[in-house]
Amino acid sequence: MNEPIALDKALASFDALWSPRIVSRVNDYDVRVTKVRGEHVWHVHDDTDEFFLVLDGELFIGLREAGGERTVVLPQGSVFTVPRGTFHKPSSPDGARILLFEPTGTLTVGDRHDEVPAHVDATTGHELG
């Protein structure tokens, strides 16, 4: 990872949905890109926030908070950070390409989660290759 990485080229190198690729590392954090369509799974990261940047498309993030559930809508170019300890569920009916920033080794389905559907890859991220 000593050379610049074109995100469009990185995203073009794989087709799997909900299966992030690690494009860079910053200290103890992974910078991951992924393609999404449909729904992920309700999950929570107990000890870390999760940063989302929508590169293309539109992403919805359902949140379960003290006051109830709400949905945050992220159009292309938007960022949002889900605070640690917050149950959330990303989804994108029409598909999106996103960049995630989270500690190396963070599982995509969190520390606690609903049943993981077959289309969701429970991973700590795949090396770009």
Image: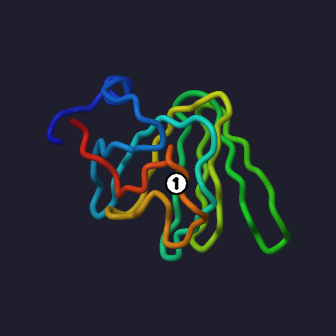
For mark 1, what is the residue?
Answer: 51
Instruction: Residue at 27%, 32% (x, y): give it.
Output: 5
Q: Residue furthest front?
A: 118
- Left or right, 65 with respect to 4, comes to right
- Left or right, 111 with respect to 90, comes to left
Residue 66's place in the image compared with 39, above or below, is below
Residue 90's place in the image compared with 54, above or below, is below
Instruction: Residue at 34%, 59% (x, y): give it.
Output: 29
Instruction: Residue at 29%, 64% (x, y): give it.
Output: 28
Residue 72's place in the image compared with 49, above or below, is above
Q: Position of residue 115 (x, y in %)?
A: 58, 62
Q: Nearer the viewer, residue 25 or 22?
A: 22
Q: Position of residue 90 (x, y in %)?
A: 62, 49
Residue type at mark 1: give it: Phe
- Left or right, 104 with respect to 81, comes to left
Q: Which colour scheme appears in the figure?
A: rainbow
The quarter of the image holding the C terminus is top left
Q: Secondary structure at mark 1?
A: strand
Q: Position of residue 26 (x, y in %)?
A: 29, 55
Instruction: Residue at 76%, 69% (x, y): give it.
Output: 65
Residue 112's place in the image compared with 17, above or below, is below
The quarter of the image holding the N terminus is top left
